[in-house]
């Protein structure tokens, strides 16, 4: 399986290792597999009795054809071990009989990003060897909160790799900030940016596109690579858990093999839901993909109208990992629906005017599969209360946005299909907002909220978040976005 850019017709083909190593295609587009491999019901039947690592190996092998099955399996076993994901990598929890939560947050940083970032460093390490790379890879990350920590944790102390993370100073929760500021490891660096997530992401993209910076880094034996969800190495691992969830739905007796289910995903950069789309295109029996947004509902509007317009107010919400106005992975869907030339033109419009409009037949194709709903801050809090008070299920703010959307979809369509809801973070990662939603009162502080939420609900604080306030802060610099390039070069030379 070879990979190509979303933006150039008949452009160069590269191996999976090369795509994972470089992250972004040379023309600024994103890498996509040249075709989407098939997954039959017969194959699915074989996977039902398999472990998560075995299912993941099977799915990855279809995409990473320049990796041996042994290599992939070694990596999936290490990444999704009981030690890293106590209780299983992606367990299901039936919330209310129709909506089943796919819990993707049992990993080391308590958010779904671990599902990809526990394995991707292993795939990148192998990619460096496979491509004969002697330079050091510098991973640059812009984060709305969860990616940064998950990438730091995945890449810490990995040979031949360094990692630098930028986060918006007022755009992440106190727990997220502390998780990053206290990161351990010899090869890590973290800085706060004055601005929002899009400013951080734009700054990182600019550094990636700057030939002078690349030259200077190269002179120092360093090249840039990305761990953002624009990297195929992030996306591929996410396909596996939809396959796994479907197998578990069959195993639980919620469906029989071949039945269609819907999937609902709390969405920001459109990576997680796009992975579900790939799974569907492979042949997994998924019907509708429900795109759940918070008050930053640019995707809801896009799915309703066909016009993507980022020229709007940016809101800071209680689901900060979804506070995004430029959903980068949407480009991959545009590529599949509209082709390279139109994708390149739409991305140019987005870059220059902040807006583009699809042709009627293009948005119609997207609407055949995707449907968008959004939750206001009140809707989100109400969904947290509903899940907990009526069903005994404690969920975080992002998952609650998804729960609201899933229920709105059921109400709007009287669909009989069960919905797999991607649950993207532990409720303790956003404890103060969850506590407030449940009690209508503020906890004594953002960190105290963890203990207070635990006392209120009897739920246990996950080990990675316990005592977070007592760890040593290693990184507390804040800078203007304009200073990002210099800080990257400094760190590369260290
Ligand atoms: C990253 C993240 C999301 C958004 O996922 P995308 O792949 O960017 O759409 C949702 N919820 C949580 C908790 C996240 O960390």
Image (cartoon, rainbow, N blue to C red):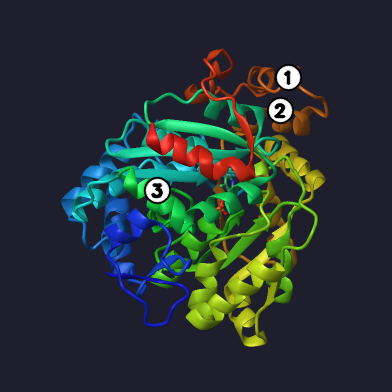
Mark 3 residue element: helix
Quadrant of the image containing the N terminus: bottom left
Which mark, by number, is residue 406? none
Residue at 54 percent across and 59 percent down: it is 273
Picture coordinates of residue 346 (x, y %)?
Answer: 61, 76
Q: Residues within 10 Å of mark 2 (few under 14, many from 20)?
A: many
Are circles 2 and 1 on residues that touch, CB within 8 Å? yes
Q: Nearer the viewer, residue 167 or 61?
A: 167
Name the quadrant containing residue 258: bottom left
- Indicate whether 155 appears above or below 72: above
Residue at 66 percent across and 24 percent down: it is 457
Picture coordinates of residue 228 (x, y %)?
Answer: 48, 50
For disc 1, the marked residue is 445
Q: Residues within 10 Å of mark 3 (few under 14, many from 20)?
A: some
- Indicate whether 75 appears above or below 277: above
Residue at 52 percent across and 15 percent down: it is 472
Q: Is residue 363 left or right of residue 150?
A: right
């Amino acid at each position: 399986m070879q990979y190509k850019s979303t933006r150039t017709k008949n452009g160069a083909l590269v191996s999976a290792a090369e795509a994972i190593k470089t992250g972004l295609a040379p023309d600024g587009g994103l890498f996509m597999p040249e075709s989407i491999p098939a997954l039959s019901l017969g194959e699915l039947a074989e996977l039902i009795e398999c472990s998560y690592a075995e299912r993941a190996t099977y799915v990855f092998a279809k995409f990473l054809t320049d990796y041996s099955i042994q290599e992939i399996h070694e990596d999936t076993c290490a990444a999704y071990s009981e030690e890293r994901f106590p209780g299983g990598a992606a367990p299901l929890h039936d919330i209310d009989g129709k909506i089943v939560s796919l819990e993707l947050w049992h990993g080391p940083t308590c958010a779904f990003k671990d599902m990809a970032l526990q394995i991707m460093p292993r795939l990148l390490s192998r990619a460096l060897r496979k491509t004969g790379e002697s330079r050091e890879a510098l991973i640059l990350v812009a984060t709305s909160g969860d990616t940064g920590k998950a990438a730091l944790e995945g890449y810490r102390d990995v040979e031949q790799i360094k990692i630098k993370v930028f986060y918006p100073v007022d755009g992440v929760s106190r727990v997220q900030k502390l998780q990053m500021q206290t990161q351990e490891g010899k090869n890590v660096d973290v800085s706060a940016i004055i601005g929002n997530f899009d400013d951080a992401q734009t700054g990182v993209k600019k550094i990636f596109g700057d030939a002078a910076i690349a030259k200077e880094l190269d002179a120092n034996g360093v090249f840039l690579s990305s761990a953002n969800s624009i990297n195929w190495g992030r996306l591929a691992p996410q396909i596996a858990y939809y396959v796994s969830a479907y197998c578990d739905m069959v195993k639980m007796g919620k469906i029989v093999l071949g039945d269609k289910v819907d999937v609902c995903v709390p969405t920001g950069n459109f990576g997680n839901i796009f992975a579900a789309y790939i799974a569907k295109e492979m042949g997994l029996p998924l019907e509708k993909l429900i795109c759940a947004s918070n008050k930053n509902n640019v995707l809801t509007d896009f799915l309703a109208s066909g016009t993507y317009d980022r020229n709007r107010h940016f809101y800071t919400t209680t689901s900060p990992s979804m506070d995004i106005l430029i959903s980068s992975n949407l480009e991959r869907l545009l590529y599949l629906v509209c082709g390279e030339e139109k994708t390149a033109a739409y991305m140019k419009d987005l870059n220059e005017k902040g807006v583009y409009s699809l042709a009627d037949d293009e948005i119609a194709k997207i609407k055949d599969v995707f449907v968008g709903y959004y939750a206001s801050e009140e809707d989100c809090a109400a969904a947290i209360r509903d899940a907990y008070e009526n069903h005994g299920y404690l969920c975080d703010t992002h998952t609650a946005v998804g729960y609201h959307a899933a229920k709105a979809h059921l109400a709007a369509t009287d669909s009989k299909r069960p919905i797999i809801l991607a649950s993207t973070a532990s409720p303790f990662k956003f404890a103060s907002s969850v506590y407030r939603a449940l009690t209508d009162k503020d906890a004594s502080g953002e960190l105290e909220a963890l203990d207070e939420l635990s006392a209120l609900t009897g739920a246990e604080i996950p080990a990675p978040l316990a005592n977070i306030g007592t760890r040593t802060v290693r990184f507390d610099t804040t800078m203007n976005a304009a200073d990002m390039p210099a800080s990257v070069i400094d760190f590369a030379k260290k």
